[in-house]
Amino acid sequence: MKKYLNLFDFSQRVDYKTEILSGLTVAMALIPEAVAFAFIAGLSPLTGLYAAFMMGLVTSILGGRPGMISGATGAVAVVIVSLAADHGVEYVFAAVVLAGILQVTAGALRLGKLMRLVPHPVIFGFVNGLAIIIFMSQLDQFKNASGDWLTGPTLYVLLALVLLTMLIIWGLPKLTKVVPSSLTAILVIFAVVKLLGLDTRTVGDMASIQGGFPPFHLPAVPLNLETLQIIFPYAAIVAGVGLIESLLTLNIIDEITETRGNGNREAMAQGAANILSGVFSGMGGCAMIGQSLINISSGARARLSGIVASVMLLVFIMFGSSLIEQVPLAALTGLMIMVAIGTFEWASLRTFTKMPKSDVFLMVLVTLITAVLHNLALAVLVGVILAALFFAWDNAKRIRARKYVDENGVKHYEMYGPLFFGSVTAFAEKFDVQNDPEEVIIDFAESRVVDMSAIEALNKITERYLKVGKKLHLKHLSTDCRKLIKNADKLVDVNVIEDPNYKLLID
């Protein structure tokens, strides 16, 4: 059974060495990601780095999932790129602030529990799609500035360094867990490149990360309805994508650590972080599954690792940019490829012949939408809608009727299965109105009247019996079913009877 985290207890037992070293590793892994995502959005590198700092710090302190890392993400970048191109960075800041307000509102309304509606095949598809995205994004490191694939010695050096990084990350934990394998791999590759004088790309080749403390800056946009019309659609999508990715990442970390976070608190923390990111010159963001898995796989379980990662990221920006800019991109590429391999749910491939075909289809579809369109919100939304439709179709086939005539000549229909919009047609076909006796009872002891379509179906079957002068009674309706019918008594006319000697447990 999962343990519930005492989220308001900052005195939890902390392995300081593990938390600090893990946070340092995450900080270095955040840099190329934040810079790359800022480029995707058409913004300056510092806009992504400031967002990574602010998002990581606020959510680490206030969030509902210790150990989870937030920062600037590709999911947010692809949403705001057109806003940045059409209206400029100030509108991006305003949209991020509004998205934060929407997320805080969602958390306050306790909408985090809606994640329970996301079925497991959708989560599998989401995770596998993200793993593919993480892996594919690393392939850009094997291309030159003009977009052509590297060849010759340059490619061989890069491949060797990436493979060495992956080997260290895979093999070191089998020998010792005293130090995080990810950090060790980065330091080893850094040393190899320096000692051998290898010519390979570094973080500094992407962009300079030098800067100061994030400047406080209220978005310079007109405060009018026109501005709201421009930024609201983007803000709503950023808020939705951010919450979906953050809460799904929270669920994944819950499974790994066998503890349970607080989705509503995380939603509010994500919102607060985006508000502050928007007013401190950041592009906004959400939880990062790759960096979160780096953190968790390094042994971090407390808030300290995320705080260290954020603070060290700011230290790198302000004081250590010249050193960090010399870190080989090959080391970070190998690290992220290992994250992609660890993120992919390989066990899901073995379930293809064991899971229902609808679940397999759902998992593959969500994976493809996530990987091809890079639209996480759309992937999850499509997955949830299709899962609901599959569920409705499956339950529509489960309505059955056991028929018999008692000693008084009354015909009984004992219904089994839910009566709802998907099963009303099959329900209506169960009855032989013309040949039934003068009195008929439909027994719902093993059934349930679910929705308005079900009530209308009862009204229609009642009318069919009344037209031929026969009596129809409904029996053993549960309390909520009777309440539903009573609320609709002005719309439908059904005859409900209760057996005084029979009481359902629900009553």
Image (spheres, rainbow, N blue to C red):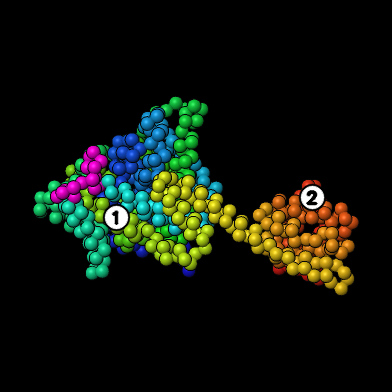
Q: Which of marks 1 and 2 is nearer the N terminus?
A: 1
- Residue at the spot 33% in from the left edge and 42% down from the top edge: 37
Q: Measuring 60% from the left and 60% from the top, which residue is drawn there?
A: 394
In which quadrant of the rendered view does residue 96 lie? top left
**Residue drawn 87% across the image and 53% down it:** 467
Label of residue 492 in the image: 2
Residue type for callout 2: Val
Is 166 on the left or on the right of 278, as rendered? left
x, y percent for residue 55:
37, 46
Could you say where residue 413 lies in the image, as x and y percent from the top left?
77, 65
- For the residues labelled 1 and 2, say whether their Cβ atoms are less than 8 Å apart: no
Q: Which of 366 and 312 is in front in this view?
A: 366
Residue 315's place in the image compared with 185, above or below, is above
Stretch of the chain drawn in magenta: 141-155
Q: Is residue 438 above or below residue 278?
A: below
Residue indicated by mark 1: 337
Q: Residues within 10 Å of mark 2 (few under 14, many from 20)?
A: some
